[in-house]
């Protein structure tokens, strides 16, 4: 049965996931072309100086890339389930309703994770070409919450899209939008070092939020 | 005979609006029951409760002995469900959707599905979203037949279908149900379709159940008498046998479960003179309108 669940979810998100991942890879490539360009024309010393002492974040163009990914995959995966209340078909399948939802959700999150791991890996590898390990570590600490924001956006959109009542959807959207700003608060490199564990736990907790919307749907809330 | 569906003291409200109170009905194994009623009388509400998508305010429905709010996967596998409008995963093509569903049902029988698909002018890789409503209905029906459920719950199966596809759907379904001893619980807005399909019926009104009986029994006992009143001031509504009365000037359409002799006796006893008295033969749709009224 899990193969069928994976098959359906893959059919829904495949082109979005592939397109997003390719665009992300191109974006990272472009980012480091810019860095290379800076090294060639301004000199490595000046670039290092601006990164170390002037707070320049060469990786800042990546800021909203994971967020866009989370939103894209969640909408691609869950919007088709709500058109004409198609989620009824899913709930009618011979599996526990929560179990099948969590399988769908896990598939989406793992797909997003794979895409993010590619970005993360490319970012780390390319960064090490231009910068020392300490600077790369600080950069990774800085971009980590942005990737968590991508997962949070994915989980929140699932909660919102599956919610049967419009007023609740609006409420969740407002609260969710405000909540996501927490991941983007500080512009100082590695400022999130001490907060990343807490943000990770909060994000992990959000992963099961969609079960509440599903419960309300099955109770017939309108 | 075992009851496949059993609903006891079902009560539901939307906000403060009462849909129905203490509704009781059952569906026997092997029967085809049609749920009839005007818009807003609770047909879709009942379907949603049966499928566990709505929790009633009071009462319960059991399917194969299990409360519909907590159906086990094993019981869900025994129920085929057609959503109003023949909704399916329209982002899939027919090959993909057959592959998807087959993974859930151990007794999956692909032959009926592909037999129906062969009658449609579609390719295996054509997305369901590009198909006509009639073609989508056949996809939905084919999937249910391949699932081979013991109970079929069909919500407004005739919605959006042209007469040809409606006839195809009904004939295929009835033949299948009778040959395989399947139980069907269905709603439809088109009563003529129901007449070809159902054995038993449950008619809902805004106040609850108007009739629960077999179609043959209902059609044999429910009657329409037309006549012209000589004095159009005569009031027939007080007569206990009158179920419904339609009066246009002095022309009367009277609906009743009583016999012609009882109606005539009442008219005689109350000195109501009429002409052109005749019993009018009805189809199920006429009888339904006669029972529930035009408004």
Image: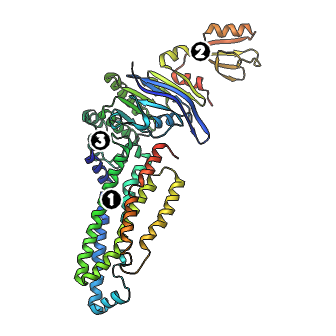
Quadrant showing the N terminus of chain A: top left
Q: Chain of mark 1?
A: A
Label at residue B101: 3
Q: Mark 2 = which residue?
A: B257
Q: Quadrant location of residue A54?
A: bottom left
Residue B161 visible from this viewpoint:
no
Q: Quadrant location of residue A146?
A: bottom left
Q: Quadrant location of residue B141?
A: top left
- Look at discs 1 and 3 and give the one toward the viewer: 1
Residue B62 picture location, percent across and down: 43, 30
Q: CA distance from mark 2 to mark 1?
A: 63 Å
Residue B127 picture location, percent across and down: 32, 48
Q: Chain of mark 2?
A: B
Name which residue lies at 43% across and 59% down.
Answer: A156
Q: Mark 1 = which residue?
A: A109
Residue B220 picture location, percent across and down: 52, 14
Q: Are marks 2 and 1 in contact (CB under 8 Å)?
A: no
Q: CA distance from mark 1 to mark 3?
A: 23 Å
Q: Residues within 10 Å of mark 1 (few under 14, many from 20)?
A: many
For mark 3, give the secondary structure.
helix
Name which residue lies at 59% across and 15% down.
Answer: B257
Query: As displayed, is residue B26 above or below residue A88?
Result: above
């Amino acid at each position: 049965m899990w193969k069928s669940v994976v098959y359906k979810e893959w059919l829904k998100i495949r082109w979005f996931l592939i397109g997003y991942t390719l665009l992300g890879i191109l974006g990272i490539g472009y980012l480091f072309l810019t860095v290379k360009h800076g090294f060639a024309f301004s000199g490595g010393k000046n670039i290092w100086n601006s990164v170390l002492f002037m707070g320049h974040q060469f990786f800042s163009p990546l800021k909203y890339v994971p967020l866009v990914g989370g939103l894209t995959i969640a909408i691609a995966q869950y919007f088709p389930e709500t058109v004409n209340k198609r989620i009824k078909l899913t709930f009618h399948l011979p599996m526990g309703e929560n179990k099948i939802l969590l399988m769908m959700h896990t598939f989406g999150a793992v797909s997003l994770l794979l895409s993010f791991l590619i970005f993360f890996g490319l970012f780390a590898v390319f960064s090490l070409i231009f910068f020392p390990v300490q600077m790369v570590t600080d950069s990774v600490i800085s971009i980590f919450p942005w990737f968590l924001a991508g997962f949070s956006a994915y989980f929140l959109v699932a909660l919102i899209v599956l919610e049967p009542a419009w007023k609740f959807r609006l409420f969740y959207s407002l609260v969710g939008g405000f909540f996501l700003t927490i991941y983007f608060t500080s512009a100082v490199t590695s400022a999130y070092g001490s907060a990343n564990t807490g943000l990770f736990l909060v994000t992990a907790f959000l992963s099961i939020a969609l079960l509440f919307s599903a419960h309300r749907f099955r109770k017939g809330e309108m | 005979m075992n009851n496949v569906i059993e609903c006891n003291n079902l009560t539901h409200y939307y906000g403060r609006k009462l849909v129905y109170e203490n509704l009781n009905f059952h569906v026997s194994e092997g029967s085809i029951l049609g749920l009839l009623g005007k818009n807003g009388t609770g047909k879709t509400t009942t379907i949603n409760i049966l499928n566990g998508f709505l929790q009633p305010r009071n009462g319960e429905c059991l399917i194969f002995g299990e409360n519909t709010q907590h159906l086990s996967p094993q019981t869900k596998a025994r129920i085929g469900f057609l959503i109003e409008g023949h909704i399916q995963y329209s982002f899939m093509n027919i090959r993909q959707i057959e592959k998807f569903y087959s993974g859930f049902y151990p007794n999956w029988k692909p032959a009926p599905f592909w037999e129906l698909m062969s009658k449609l002018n579609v390719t295996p890789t054509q997305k369901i979203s590009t198909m006509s409503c009639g073609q989508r209905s056949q996809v939905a029906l084919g999937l249910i037949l391949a699932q081979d459920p013991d109970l079929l719950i069909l919500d407004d199966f005739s919605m959006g279908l042209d007469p040809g596809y409606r006839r195809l759907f009904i004939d295929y379904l009835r033949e299948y149900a009778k040959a395989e001893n399947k139980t069907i619980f269905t709603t439809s807005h088109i009563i003529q379709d129901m007449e070809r399909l159902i054995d038993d019926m449950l008619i809902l009104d805004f106040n609850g159940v108007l009739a629960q009986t077999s179609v043959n029994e209902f059609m044999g006992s429910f009657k329409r008498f037309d006549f012209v009143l000589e004095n159009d001031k005569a009031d027939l509504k007080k007569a206990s046998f009158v179920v419904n009365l339609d009066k246009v000037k002095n022309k009367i359409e009277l609906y009743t479960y009583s016999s012609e002799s009882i109606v005539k006796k009442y008219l005689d006893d109350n000195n109501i003179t009429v002409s052109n008295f005749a019993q009018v033969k009805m189809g199920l749709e006429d009888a339904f309108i006669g029972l529930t009224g035009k408004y």
